[in-house]
Image: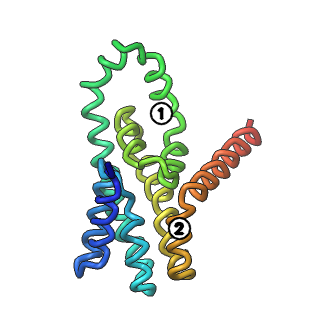
Amino acid sequence: MALFQPLYTKALGWSRHRLAPAWLTFISFIEAIFFPVPPEVMLAPMTLAHPHSWFRYASLSLFGSTLGAFVGYAVGHFAIHWVEPHLVEMGFGPAFAEARESLRTHGFWIMLVGGFTPIPFKLFTIAAGAVSMPLLPFLAAVLIGRGKRVYLVAGAIRLGGERAERALHRYIEPVGWTALVLLVVGIIALWIWKA
């Protein structure tokens, strides 16, 4: 049974619609909260069809993702009070407390990494709300983390055309994980250097 393929196909269809920019903004918005298909499935074909609009499309995607990130934050912030007692009851209390402290102290870096990885962004936005991460670092991390992803994707397709789009779909996982590893190594090196 295919679960994600129908959603992927639907999003590709939306990318050809005359209201595609609005659909792209909407998909980017709901993907930061609950939708399982990343906005790149619309961003890539739209950029391929109109290469000179790549910056506009990436900006719309970032705008939608940022608004969605705040809704995801609110979901995490208000829903965690219902979920936390069950986590403690199931024995996850210490792990949850540790995760909460990590996000409080390193939330900016965790969100920055989360905006670029293939791990669903909604997990990071909801978790940030669950631990009441300060809003200014949250916003900065969302703008930088998600921004570098959408501008990189749209820019690569603008420069590489159809071949870049095919490569993106084929290699998005390894590229995302490689970028994550490099960022983590950079953060660790900076932390060691400052210590």
Q: Position of residue 152 (x, y in %)?
A: 53, 69
Amino acid type at circle 1 is Arg
Q: Secondary structure at mark 1?
A: helix
Determine the residue located farthest toward the right in the rendered image. Answer: 193
Residue 16 relative to residue 164: left or right = left
Residue 22 relative to residue 168: left or right = left
Q: CA distance from mark 1 to mark 2?
A: 33 Å
Q: Is residue 160 above or below residue 14?
A: below
Neighbour tally class for label 1: few under 14, some 14-19, many 20 plus, Cα within 10 Å: some
Q: Residue at x 42, y 43 (%)?
A: 124
Q: Is residue 139 above or below residue 83?
A: below
Neighbour tally class for label 2: few under 14, some 14-19, many 20 plus, Cα within 10 Å: some
Q: Position of residue 115 (x, y in %)?
A: 47, 53
| Of labels 1 and 2, the one closer to you | 2
Q: Residue at x 31, y 68 (%)?
A: 24
Residue wearing tag 1: 104
Q: Position of residue 173 (x, y in %)?
A: 55, 55
Amino acid type at circle 2 is Leu
Q: How many marks?
A: 2
Residue wearing tag 2: 168
